[in-house]
Amino acid sequence: MTDATASEPRRRSPLWMRALLVVSLSVNLAFVGVVVGQSIRMQTQEARIKGLDRWQARLLTMVPEPRRDEAKSLMLAELDLFREARAQMAESRVRTIAAVRREPFEPQELAAALQARVSEMNRLSDLRHRQMLEIASKLNAEERELFAEGMERAIRRWRPKSAAR
């Protein structure tokens, strides 16, 4: 015995339904493409600023467009200090990891390595704060407002969703 449904011809969905499915999929793919493209563009925009430290590049994107060249030259003048501080940070990270792995474990060695790391982080932070202060102090009131808006945009972009509340 055969099934009664097996002998009946299969019904196709209406043309308008298939067209709607294609349009819906296209819109969804376009939306995903825009979101991914925007995310990649933001990341590569910072990486495209040649010669600058990652933090400096991020800061430069917050500076109003007419003043970016001036700010960039200011940043490039101190680039060696940033590179040196980052190299010291990398060295202190290596010393910290070595102190953790050392057998027999020496708590004083780890404490010294961690203290060196804190000192290097503070040095880098001081460089960043000084540079930001120098840039902001050269801006007029309107430009500082644009700078503040750029900072707010960066905070919204990089802050985790759970911290937004």
Image (cartoon, grey):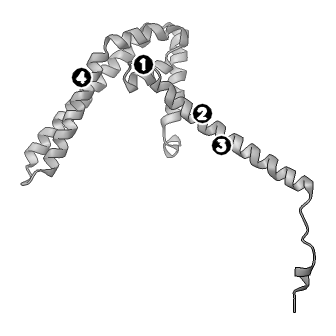
* Mark 4 residue element: helix
Whole-number angstrom distance, CA of label 3 to CA of label 2? 10 Å
Q: Which residue is mark 3?
A: 32
* Mark 2 residue element: helix
Residue type for callout 2:
Gln
Q: Which residue is mark 2?
A: 38
User: Which one is in front in this view, the residue at disc 4 or the one at disc 1?
Assistant: 1
Q: Give percent across and percent down for residue 101.
A: 15, 51
Whole-number angstrom distance, CA of label 3 to CA of label 1? 29 Å
User: At 34% from the left edge and 20% from the top edge, which residue is drawn?
Assistant: 129
* Mark 1 residue element: loop
In this rendering, the answer to whether 99 lies above or below 55 is below
Q: Which residue is mark 4?
A: 84
Q: Give percent across and percent down for residue 122.
A: 25, 28
In this rendering, the answer to whether 138 lies above or below 92 is above
Q: Give percent across and percent down for residue 158.
A: 48, 35
Residue type for callout 1:
Lys
Q: Are marks 2 and 4 in contact (CB under 8 Å)?
A: no
User: At 72% from the left edge and 46% from the top edge, which residue is drawn?
Assistant: 28
User: In the rendered structure, which disc, 3 or 2, sits on the residue that comes first in sequence?
Assistant: 3
User: In the rendered structure, which disc, 4 or 1, sits on the residue that comes first in sequence?
Assistant: 1
Q: Are marks 3 and 1 in contact (CB under 8 Å)?
A: no
Residue type for callout 3:
Val
User: In the rendered structure, which disc, 2 or 4, sits on the residue that comes first in sequence?
Assistant: 2
